[in-house]
Image (cartoon, rainbow, N blue to C red):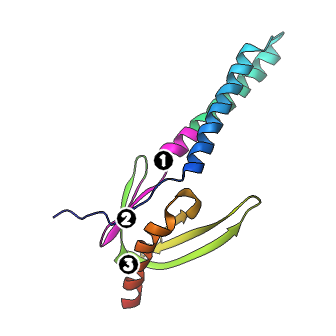
Amino acid sequence: MENKIIAKSIRSKSNFITVLFGVGFFIFLILLLENNSVLKNDYEKNIRTIGLIIIVLIILYCIYYLLNHKRIYVYKNYFEIKELLRKRKIYFSKIKKYSSEYIEGEDFTWTEHYIILDTEEKITLKDFDYSNFDYFFSFIEKRFKKYIKTN
């Protein structure tokens, strides 16, 4: 019998739109560098090439960030964290400790949740990455608190 998904995460639309806007902006910068530059010597050509490489690396990192975003699925006895090339099952009985830290940045505030397993592995979940964080994390929290109390 296959387990049914109780809750799942939904990616924050504001993060997604911001990263897509950034990718578009950097592509626009590449077009500007290519079309509006009259190069007189090798030094200017090398500087432009280095600039293009840096911009392309930033674009590749933004695409990697979008593709590697953690997706979380909550089941009855465990939850799964799926990333681009990795999938992990974390059983609630394996959770040793839980803590959270409220962080104030310049522009906004967020909470980082730390889940520490029996193997001393630390899993970090940030609430600004998901639009329904409180919904799916309440299922996780309720289940692993039950296991922590029994242990």
Q: Secondary structure at mark 2?
A: strand
Nearer-N-terminus badge (1/2): 2
Is label 1 or label 2 in front? Answer: 2
- Does label 3 or label 1 sit earlier along the sequence? 1
Up-down relation of residue 142 to residue 109 (above or below) = below
Q: Is residue 151 visible?
A: no
Q: CA distance from mark 2 to mark 3?
A: 12 Å
Horizontal and vertical percent position of residue 68: 48, 47
Check disc 1 and give the amino acid type. Asn
| Relative side of 116 to 46, left or right | left
Residue, x 37% and y 59% (percent of image)? 88
Label ID, residue 68: 1
Residue identified by numbered label 3: 143
Residue 3 found in image quarter: bottom left
Region of the chain picked out in magenta, as a range: 62-82
Q: Mark 2 highlights which residue?
A: 7
Q: Is residue 30 visible?
A: yes
Q: Secondary structure at mark 3?
A: helix
- Graded by Cα atoms within 10 Å as few (under 14), some (14 to 19) or many (20 or more), the crowding at tag 2 reads some
- State yes or no: discs 1 and 2 in contact (Cβ < 8 Å): no
